[in-house]
Amino acid sequence: MLVILLGNALALTATSLMQIFILDALISLNLINFLQTMGYLLMAYLIMLGMTYLKIRYQSKLIQQQTTFLRVKVLKKISQISYEDFKSKESQSYVSWFTNDMDLIEKQSLVPLYALIGGIINAITSGIALLTMHWSLIALTASLVLVLLFIPKLFSGRMERTTRQVAQANEEFIQKIGNYLMAYDTIFSYRKFSYIIKKTEQASDHLAQEKNNYQKEIGWVTVISGLGNILSQFSLYALTGYLAVQQIVTIGSLSATASLAGDIFNTVSNISQYLAIIKSSKPIFDKFEALEPAHYISQNLTPIDELSLENISFAYQENPLFTGLLYRFKIGGKYAITGNSGSGKSTLLNLLAGKNRHYQGTIRYGKNSI
């Protein structure tokens, strides 16, 4: 992928440099040099188009591979949390993690990341081209780039906040729609379709508002970055004009400088936006990283001979269900747990399954306790 991005950047820079020779050939009325350079320019454009096709194709493959990798990683983290932690969220919230959140990561992290890498490579090749023209051009460019790169810091906090709100609104929307559809039988019986339509519209309006707030922040980043971009290109173009008047560079350099400056500062301006957008995805990754593994959960269950209860005591709302329970279940044996309603049969099964950790004593699977 890096080779493709580099090839695309070199072809784009070559088209800019060839403008020097084209304009100088016209000024000197040299038709042969003009036509020859036009042929080279056409070849550079065709190479650039080919590289663009390859970039789009392989970038899509890489993004989908990385999204799948993230889904698997998140699922592994979920499989390691306790049963109580898993049940602390609605199932629709987890669905939102694997759908909406992953879609946000693709749009706000992976796509901008590859655009950022390509932009940096393009800016480097364009900067080298400016250096071959005159050192002062690259010196001014470097100073202006530092100013443009400072812009994302002005918006990073607000971008993170609005991204967190969009992710939360997506979870709430899916959860509400899921609840409404689960109650469809009741709604159908009472013919309360207007109720579900009204509630869905309200939930959708809330989600739309959060997304609009996010796009508002994107708009501010775009405008401020664009203003810095315009001023930077104007400054570099003015310096090139001064160098041309002093006969330090040729008149044709004005055309190339305009093109190269546009490539560099448009890239840096976009970098400012990309950095702000990429950083705005941090709350989503923080949410995934916040999943704490339950150390008692073993991912590799080995064959055992028995399951034993050692002095197990459990109380529900300070009312003891059983105290000092001792028992051994032999593998292959058949057992029946009997008792009146509310005596703790389901609770005992939940303890054995590791679903409830609020007990005293020890439960052992073979020689391992949980």
Image (spheres, helix red, strand yellow):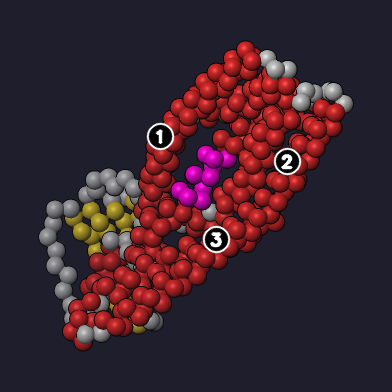
Q: Residue at x 64, y 42 (%)?
A: 266
Cα distance between the residues tagged 1 and 2? 32 Å
Left or right for 121, reference 199: right
What is the crowding at mark 1: few (fewer than 14 residues within 10 Å), some, or many (at least 20)? few
Q: Residue at x 68, y 40 (%)?
A: 265
Q: Which residues are magenta?
A: 106-116
Residue type of the residue flagged with mark 3: Gln
Q: Position of residue 244 (x, y in %)?
A: 82, 27
Q: Quadrant of residue 13?
A: top right
Q: Secondary structure at mark 3?
A: helix
For this rendering, which residue is in front, 211 or 233? Answer: 233
**Callout in the foreground (1, 2):** 2
Residue 233, numbered circle: 2
Cα distance between the residues tagged 1 and 3? 27 Å
Residue type of the residue flagged with mark 1: Arg
Cα distance between the residues tagged 2 and 3? 26 Å
Q: How many marks?
A: 3
Q: Position of residue 360 (x, y in %)?
A: 38, 68
Q: Residue at x 25, y 73 (%)?
A: 182
Left or right for 9, reference 347: right
- Residue on which disc 3 sits: 215
One can see residue 155 in this view: yes
Q: Position of residue 309 (x, y in %)?
A: 29, 62
Residue type of the residue flagged with mark 2: Gln
For this rendering, which residue is in front, 25 or 235? Answer: 25
For this rendering, which residue is in front, 292 or 273? Answer: 273
Q: Quadrant of residue 202?
A: bottom left
What is the crowding at mark 2: few (fewer than 14 residues within 10 Å), some, or many (at least 20)? many
- Residue on which disc 1 sits: 57
Q: Secondary structure at mark 1?
A: helix
What is the crowding at mark 3: few (fewer than 14 residues within 10 Å), some, or many (at least 20)? some
